[in-house]
Amino acid sequence: MSPLESQIINELQGGFPVSENPFAEVAGRLGVSEEQVMSGIQGLLNDGMLSRFGPLYHAERMGGGLTLAAMSIPESDFDRVAAIVNGFPEVAHNYERDHEFNMWFVVATDKPEQVGNVLEHIQSQAGYTVFNMPKEQEFFIGLRLEA
Amino acid sequence: MNLPAMKRQMPHGDQVIDETDRRIIIATQAGLPVTKRPYHDLALQLGLEANEVMARMQKMIQDGVIRRIGVVPNHYALGYTANAMSVWDVPDEKITELGERVGQLDFVSHCYQRPRHLPSWPFNLFAMVHGKSTAAVEEKIREIENVLGEDNRGNALLYSKRILKKTGLRLT
C-alpha cells in the first residue's frame, strides 16, 4: 500500500467536505493533487480495501427503529433458526459468535414501534427466547484503523 | 466532530428528514461518486440544484442524521481478521464515565450501553475490538481491563465465527 493510500485510510474516515470541489480541498490538506486523491480512493474501492466511500447514516436519526438481539441456539438447530432469522427483511446483519448466546442480529425497521413486533415473530417462529439489547447510550468513538 | 455520549431517543413522529432528504439518502447509500464535483453530479441525477443538495447534507450532518462522510475501510482486507465483541459488567452509576473512556481507545469501533438480562446476561457495556490476530485482540482486552480496574465485575469476549447475513441498512 502506498503512503497516500495509507493516508487516505487513516485520515479520511470522516470530515470529507460538502463543497463545490471537495477532492481539491482534501488534496490541499494532504499535500497532493486532486487527481491523486480521486484515483487513490477509486483504486482502494476497486481493490476492496474500502467497502464504501460516502456518507454514513445514523439509522435512528432517520426516524427508523434499530436494535441488537441475541439468541442461544443448540448447534443441531442452528441452521434452521439462521434461515428463519435471515428470512426477515428487517434483519440487516446476523452473526454467529462463539458463546452460549451464539446468534446476534441487528433489526432495522421504518418505524421504531415495529421492532417489538419483528422480535416477537422471530421468537415464535424460531421457538427460542429473543433477548432484546437496544442501545441505551452511545459513547464517542475515535476509531482509526492503522493501514 | 467530537460528540459527547448521547442518548439515542428521538421523539417518535418528529420527522427530521423529509422526502427530498430521503431521496438524497437513497441515492448515496451505495456511496458518493468519485468525480470532481460529486454533489453536482448527485444533484443532476436527482433533478435538484447542487446548492440545495449541499445545504441539505450540511443540515443532516448538524442533525446527526449523517454521522460522517468519508472512506469506510474493509477490516478484513486490511488484515483485521480478528473481530470480537467484548462485553463488560460495570456499575450502572459509573457507566457513562467508563464508556467514554473505553470508546476513546483507538481500537474500539463501537461502544454502547445495552440492557442486562439477568441471570443469563449480566453485561451492560459493549465494545467492539478489532485486531490482526486473536493475540492482538487479547492484548487490547487487557488494556480495557486496565481502564476499568475494579469496576470490571466480569466480562466475556465473543469472536465472530461466521457472517450469516449482511445486507447493511437499506431504505426502500
Image (cartoon, coloured by chain):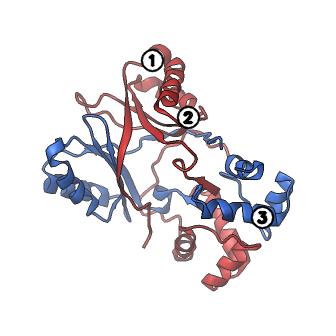
Chain colours: A blue, B red
Closer to the N terminus: mark 2 or mark 1? Answer: 2
The answer to whether residue B117 is left or right of residue A145 is left
- Residue B168, image x and y in percent? 44, 60
- Front residue of this view, candidates B123 and B159: B159
Kindly identify which chain the residue marked by label 3 belongs to. A
Quarter where residue B126 is shown: top left
The residue where tag 2 is placed is B103
The answer to whether residue A125 is left or right of residue B135 is left
Compared with A25, A14 (above or below) is above
Q: Is residue A139 visible?
A: yes
- Residue B156, image x and y in percent? 36, 27
Residue found 54% across the figure and 21% down from its top: B147
* Circle number at residue B151: 1
Residue found 38% across the figure and 18% down from its top: B153
Label 1 sits on a secondary structure element that is helix
Kindly identify which chain the residue marked by label 2 belongs to. B
Label 2 sits on a secondary structure element that is helix
- Residue A122, image x and y in percent? 21, 55
Label 3 sits on a secondary structure element that is helix
The answer to whether residue A98 is left or right of residue B87 is left
Quarter where residue A107 is shown: bottom left
